[in-house]
Amino acid sequence: MFNNPKRAFFEAFFLALLIFIIGLLIGVSFEDSRLDKINEYYTLSEISLIDSVALNKISDLKNISCDELINYDLSFADKIYEEAALLERYEKSGKITNEMNIAHKRYDLLRTILWTNVIKTREKCSGSLNSVVYLYNYNNNDLTERAEQIVWSRILFDLKQKTGEKVILIPISIDNNITSLRLLVKEFKINKYPAVIINEKDILYDLTSVADIEKHLK
Amino acid sequence: MEALTIIYLVYAFVSLYFLFLFSLVYLQNKKQMLYCPKANKIYSLDMVVPCYNEEDTIEATVKSLLASDYKGLNNIYVVDDCSTDSSYEIIKKLAEKYNKVIALQTPKNIGKAAKAKNYGAKFAKSELIGFTDADSFPDKDAISKAIGFFNDEKVAGVTALILVKNRENVIERLQSLEYKVIAFTRRLLGFLEAIYVTPGPLAIYRKKIFTEIGGFDEKNVTEDIEITWNLVSKGYKVEMSMPSRILTVVPDNLKQWYRQRIRWNIGGIQTIKKYKSLFFKKGALGSFILPYFVLSWILGVVGLSILLYNFGKKIFVNYLSTIYSVEAQTAVLTLRDISLTPSVLSFYGIFLFILGLSFTIFVLSFLKEKNYKKEGILSLAGYTLFYLSVYPIILVASMYNYLKGRDIW
């Protein structure tokens, strides 16, 4: 017979606890390594954005071509769009820590600045620059709205694939409590989300086809 | 952290705990796994076989008992519960042919195994009383190897190694695997004095104590669980004799299997309810068996509910997004929708799966049999990936049936 049955219960408990804690720590460091990767991208993106903003300011003093300004904004928007896709995948698979949410907020801030930069660029260059700003709720408990957002993402992805460098696509979550974004959006008098703002003129609320969106582009 | 993640982590911890508990108990007692003490004397033993519509197996069951090498076996009381097939005719013929066999029939169909067993037990006059289901076949030495445990005055019941006889189709093979794992872990629980069931295929009790506790609880549909808890709650010991092998017939189709599992679980609920006052009290029953049962219920029901809720939400969102996608003339499914980024929980799951699988493989190698084919990889995969996942569904269905007042024998 077992010498002391109670001992086995305790030994198993402490052993399980030890392995469990080690597992949790590995889990946290695993998710942190993903966050580090995102942060690394973010730092580079931040540098690019500041560069872009600086470029816009310099253009007031020096004669910088509109093509150069637009191309810079475009390539930057595309870059952070890809990073956002990676961030989204990591967010979905992040279970232990919630630091990805903070990274998401930082990216939203970055995209808000990009949007203001694009507005300025458009003021200077009346060419064929198109901006499509997609505003959505990040924490959404309404299932119908969530389904709508999924479809909006697909439509806008298709649009970007089709139009390529003609369109700057900027998805921003609206419920991240970013003051500058709130003030920026206020003037558009948006009454519900998700909403798509095209060239700061047209606002779409209802799901529509890529072809219909294209009609709003320059 | 999401609620489902917390539930998942609790599951992971509980699984880890039991894996470590069983591994530690095995490592510290591996030399005694097959231990069966030699009996100090020849204890007199009567066997009771309850029978209802078992014309295909009853003769073989009785003959396997008659073939037992145990010298103290006196009478075999075969209790027919007014079968509608030819069971009773077969029993009477056996009684005519063999002196030890006594044919009994209940005055009317009583429809409960516990009642039929208690009915037969009234006729037994020996020191020990054993019960065998009418579709189970103890090996020649199964009884003799179990008797020695009764040398210890505190031992009130002894159970044995129950394995599956019919292993033809998938559901039978999966149950065969399950029975082996259950038998192995039951032996380990024996070292912790925490055996929670003395199953119907073969259980032997000290007659005096059996009578003292009033026999089987006739209101309980799993009288074999209830009597064990009853014995343990009164401070008696229950042992398991690993070398005592019994083969039993298991359900050969899903419907029967489902009914059996519902019955077992309803019996489990009835027993928990009856002994709830002993929670965290009275030795192994209050401190381990009861919490173990209740915890598996809670984890099963809560986990399944949250899983179904999330799954339902996902289905609804996917349904809506498909409709919207069609309306907006965009792709219904894109590559981006398929997440290929594994989460930490996926790695935990794989780790636990490997641990569980290793444990199962170890059990199978420990209990390998000469007369049967080794379990294949497909059976092993089916058992670990699908069969075990159905348990929580059965738990919830049993709870529903219990609350609806459905009684299944």
Image (spheres, coloured by chain):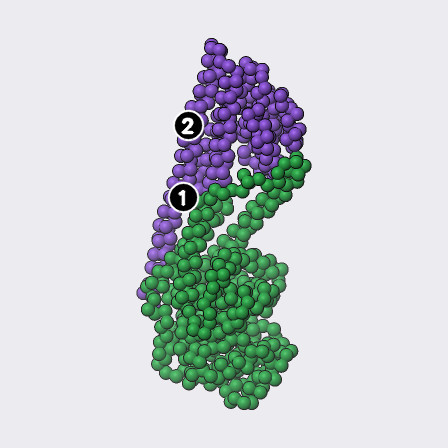
Is residue B148 rendered to the left or right of residue B258? left
**Picture disc at residue B51:** none
| Label 1 environment density (alpha carbons within 10 Å; few <14, some 14–19, many ≥20) | many
Label 2 residue SS = helix
Name the residue tied to disc 2: A43
> Looking at the picture, how far across and down is residue A155, in whole percent?
61, 33
> Which residue is more in the foreground, A167 or B121?
A167
> Which hue is chain B drawn in?
green
Q: Disc 2 marks which amino acid?
A: Thr
Upstream in the sequence, badge 1 or badge 2? 1
> Which residue is more in the foreground, B396 or A192?
A192
**Picture disc at residue A27:** 1
Q: Residue at x 58, y 72 (%)?
A: B112
Q: Residue at x 57, y 24 (%)?
A: A166
- Looking at the picture, does residue B277 appear above or below residue A35? below
> Looking at the picture, how far across and down is residue B144, in whole percent?
41, 80
Which image quarter: residue A168?
Answer: top right
- Looking at the picture, does residue B225 appear above or below residue A73? below
> Looking at the picture, how far across and down is residue B300, in whole percent?
51, 55
Which image quarter: residue B364?
Answer: bottom left
Label 1 residue SS = helix
Chain drawn purple, letter?
Answer: A
Q: Chain of mark 2?
A: A
Q: Disc 1 marks which amino acid?
A: Gly
| Label 2 environment density (alpha carbons within 10 Å; few <14, some 14–19, many ≥20) | few
Determine if residue B194 is in view.
no
Q: Residue at x 54, y 48 (%)?
A: B306
